[in-house]
Amino acid sequence: MYLRIVHIVILGCGRVGSLLAQHLDESGHSVAIIDQDAGAFRRLNAEFSGLTVKGIGFDRETLENAGITRAQAFAAVSSGDNTNILAARVARETYGVDRVVARIYDPRRAEIYERLGIPTVATVAWTSSQIMRRVLPLGSDELFRDPSGLVAMGEVSVGDRWIGQRTTDLELASRSRISFISRYGEPVIPNVESVIQEGDHVYVTYHVADVEHVERVFAQGPQEA
């Protein structure tokens, strides 16, 4: 699996934030997590090697102590909608962070913020997985490899340019086979009429030697493929 190490700042060490921070930390990324309540950091396990910063998430000093100036991604997942969106806007507009996502509890407000250019996640059940998809560089997560070591199956992130495109076109361009798609928590086995939809989790069988090609094509879209 190809993994590009990034620095990610997370606002909010609740259930979602702590789970997200631990998963990213275990994956080898550099992580800093912010919370106003120092006691919230007790949710992190003893093996967590990232940075914990006590403070207000949209305060510049707090953000800079968390390494926002070198961050490639910022996720605001505190319990307050206003705090999350304000912090997300500061991260993007003041510090130029490319990958920014805010957790918003009110779906109607989420739509407004999406129009302002701040990606939001409003559905609680999908919060962690969707944030992971937004903050990490597109790539693959190998789940199985056959005994020969030549063929693997894993989840591969799909770039936005593939949305609405046929799965058969994606298979042909990437020299891989889509085993199944997880769509809204339900498994879907694609056929010749199937198309990629927003939020799909795509599980692919591929030759291990081709993994970088598969990741590149999935990320770039049909025009570059």
Image (tube, grey):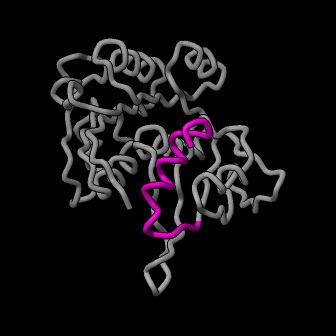
Task: Looking at the picture, tell me which residue is in the foreground, 55 or 159.
Answer: 159
Screen quadrant of the N terminus: bottom left
Position in image of residue 78 (x %, y %): 41, 32
Frontmost residue, 135 versus 56: 135
189 sits to left or right of 62? right
Magenta span:
205-225
Give the number of callouts. 0
Q: Residue at x 45, y 31 (%)?
A: 79
Percent coordinates x, y for residue 191 in the rendering:
81, 59
Give the side of residue 217 with respect to residue 54, left or right.
Answer: right
Res 149 → quadrant:
bottom left
Q: In this rendering, is residue 123 above or below 156?
A: above
**Place of residue 171 in the rendered image (x, y in percent of width and height, measured from the top left):** 65, 56
**Picture residue at 30% right of the left edge, 24% below the top:** 57
Towards the viewer: 138 or 67: 138
> Residue 120 appears in which quarter of the rendering?
top right
Residue at left offset 53%, top offset 42%: 130
Work out which residue is located at the far right of the displayed protein and give it.
Answer: 193
Q: Is residue 214 above or below residue 126?
A: below
Q: Position of residue 122 (x, y in %)?
A: 59, 32
Residue 216 on the magenta segment? yes
In the displayed structure, would residue 34 be above or below residue 148? above
Above or below: residue 44 compared with residue 88: below
The quarter of the rendered structure image containing the C terminus is top right
